[in-house]
Structure formats: structure tokens, C-alpha cells
Image (cartoon, rainbow, N blue to C red):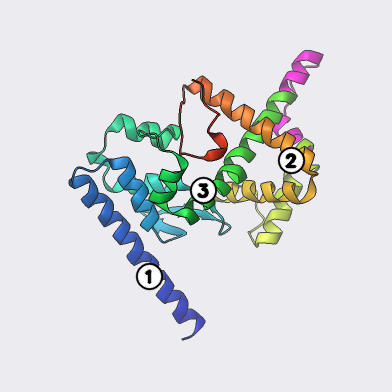
């Protein structure tokens, strides 16, 4: 079998797995099973790392390592949207708040160990990395206010430089060169997520362990503050954030 033929077979196999996941989700809801746990089981059955659906690009697995489970949840919910409680679905898709609190072992059992590990990669590599940038940007804005020197127009650029020791444009150019993306002015949401995950790995390779630990704590503290402000009391079960929520 040629490489092209192998890719075609793999694509067809993934499509069949995806169709089975959607079929299972619909039948589980029709039978009266809880929609959220049924959705997690369907996620466990899903095969494709990415797809084009209704003129939209969906990239579920970034760099073959980081699983965007919430994007897949959105895709699955769309197939049965009228059958789901609107308030619960909105809380999940817009705020990442599930309607059922599950511990890590329960989530692993529903979506599988591999996808759970990939979810952790996404959490640390995208969610936490985004939070780190916002936390540093917020600190810069406070410094400017305390010093009374007026508003800095490019606090985001300064945040990139403080964290990665390079400007965003330089980092983006390097990322695109390494990943064979087109060098252009704009950036899509999918590429931004991939860039953020690349930044996470870039930082791990170049920073000392003490600085990595400090930056991670800073980002998690920022996330906890955001969760408290939004009234979030749970998210997809993860051992490392078990103590993150207010009681």
C-alpha cells in the first residue's frame, strides 16, 4: 500500500469513527442518559484530529499533542442542540463549566487516558499560557499606573518580551518558519492556539525550572481570580486544579 493509499484509509477510518461518535451521542440522549456524560463518552470515540464542517475549520488536536476538548464539545452539541438544556449547554461552551461534577478518574474513564493526557497538555500549553500573558500584561499596566507615566499602548508586546525575551513579531516569525506556516500579517484563531502552544514549549526549553514554576503559579493564580469573578466552581476534572475553586 502506498503512502497516499494509507492516508486515504486512515481518513476514511477517522470519518467512520466520528460518525459512530455522533450516532452514539444522539442515541444516548434519546435513551434518557445524561447528556454531558454521554458527550464525554462520544468524545472518547472521536477519531479525527481536525476536520472541515459547514465551511468551518475545526482543529481538535494541536501539534499532535494538545486536545481542545471544548471545541469538540461544541461540534458534538451542534448535532443535538435542540435536545439539550440551553442553560447547561451555554455554561459549558461559553464558560467551560460542566453541568455534572466529575473527578479526574471518572473523566479519564469516559474519554480515555490518552485524550485526558492530551487535555492536560492543552490546559497547560494553551489555557495557562494565555493566562500567563494576561497576568504579566495586567502587572505592566499596574506598574504604569503606579508610576504615573501615562498609558503604554503596547503592554501586550511588552508582556511577550518579559516572558520570552523576544518581541511577539519575532516569535511569530520563528514559529511560522519552524512549522511551515505562511508568513503574513493576520493570524487565525486556529493558528493562534498553535502559536500559544509553541510558546509554551519554547518557554520550557529556554527557562530555568524555578522561573517556569514561578510563571506557572502566576498564571494559575490569575485563572483562579478569573474563575472567582465569574462564579465558576468547577471545570473539566483535573487533578492539578482540584484546589483551585472557592468553597
Residue 174 percent location from the top left of the image = 73, 54
Residue at mark 2: 212
Which disc number belongs to residue 128? none
Residue 24 figure quarter: bottom left
Q: Earlier in the sequence, mark 3 or mark 2?
A: 3
Secondary structure, mark 3, is helix
Whether residue 129 is visible, yes or no, is yes
Structural crowding at the residue carrying mark 2, measured as other residues with C-alpha within 10 Å and reported as few (<14), some (14–19) or many (≥20): some
Would residue 120 be found to the left or right of residue 20 on screen? right
Structural distance between the alpha carbons of marks 3 and 1: 23 Å
Residue projecting furthest to the front: 105
- Which contiguous range is marked in magenta? 141-161
Residue where numbered disc 3 is placed: 119
Looking at the image, is mark 1 or mark 2 nearer the viewer?
2
Residue designated by label 1? 13
Our reading of the magenta stretch's main secondary structure is helix
In the displayed structure image, the side of residue 159 where residue 127 appears, left or right:
left
Mark positioned earlier in the residue sequence (1 or 2): 1
Distance between mark 3 and mark 2 Cα atoms = 20 Å
Frontmost residue, 80 versus 123: 123
Identify which residue, 185 or 121, lies in the foreground: 121
Whether 147 is among the magenta residues is yes
Quadrant of residue 218 within the rendered picture = top right
Q: Position of residue 162 (x, y in %)?
A: 78, 36
Amino acid at each position: 500500500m502506498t503512502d497516499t493509499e494509507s492516508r486515504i484509509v486512515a481518513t476514511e477510518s477517522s470519518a467512520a469513527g466520528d460518525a459512530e461518535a455522533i450516532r452514539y451521542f444522539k442515541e444516548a440522549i434519546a435513551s434518557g442518559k445524561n447528556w454531558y456524560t454521554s458527550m464525554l463518552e462520544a468524545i472518547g470515540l472521536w477519531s479525527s484530529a481536525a476536520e472541515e464542517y459547514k465551511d468551518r475549520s475545526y482543529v481538535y488536536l494541536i501539534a499532535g499533542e494538545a486536545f481542545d476538548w471544548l471545541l469538540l464539545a461544541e461540534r458534538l452539541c451542534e448535532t443535538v442542540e435542540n435536545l439539550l438544556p440551553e442553560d447547561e449547554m451555554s455554561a459549558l461552551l461559553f464558560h467551560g463549566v460542566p453541568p455534572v461534577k466529575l473527578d479526574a478518574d471518572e473523566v479519564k474513564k469516559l474519554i480515555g487516558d490518552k485524550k485526558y493526557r492530551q487535555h492536560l497538555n492543552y490546559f497547560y500549553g494553551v489555557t495557562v499560557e494565555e493566562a500567563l500573558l494576561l497576568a504579566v500584561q495586567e502587572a505592566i499596566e499596574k506598574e504604569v499606573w503606579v508610576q504615573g507615566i501615562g498609558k503604554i499602548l503596547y503592554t501586550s508586546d511588552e508582556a511577550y518580551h518579559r516572558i520570552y525575551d523576544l518581541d511577539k513579531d519575532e516569535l511569530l516569525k520563528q514559529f511560522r518558519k519552524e512549522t511551515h506556516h505562511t508568513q503574513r500579517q493576520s493570524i487565525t484563531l486556529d493558528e493562534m492556539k498553535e502559536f500559544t502552544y509553541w510558546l509554551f514549549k519554547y518557554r520550557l526549553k529556554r527557562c530555568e525550572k524555578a522561573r517556569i514554576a514561578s510563571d506557572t503559579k502566576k498564571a494559575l493564580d490569575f485563572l483562579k481570580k478569573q474563575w472567582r469573578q465569574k462564579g465558576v466552581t468547577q471545570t473539566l476534572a483535573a487533578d492539578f486544579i482540584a484546589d483551585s475553586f472557592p468553597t
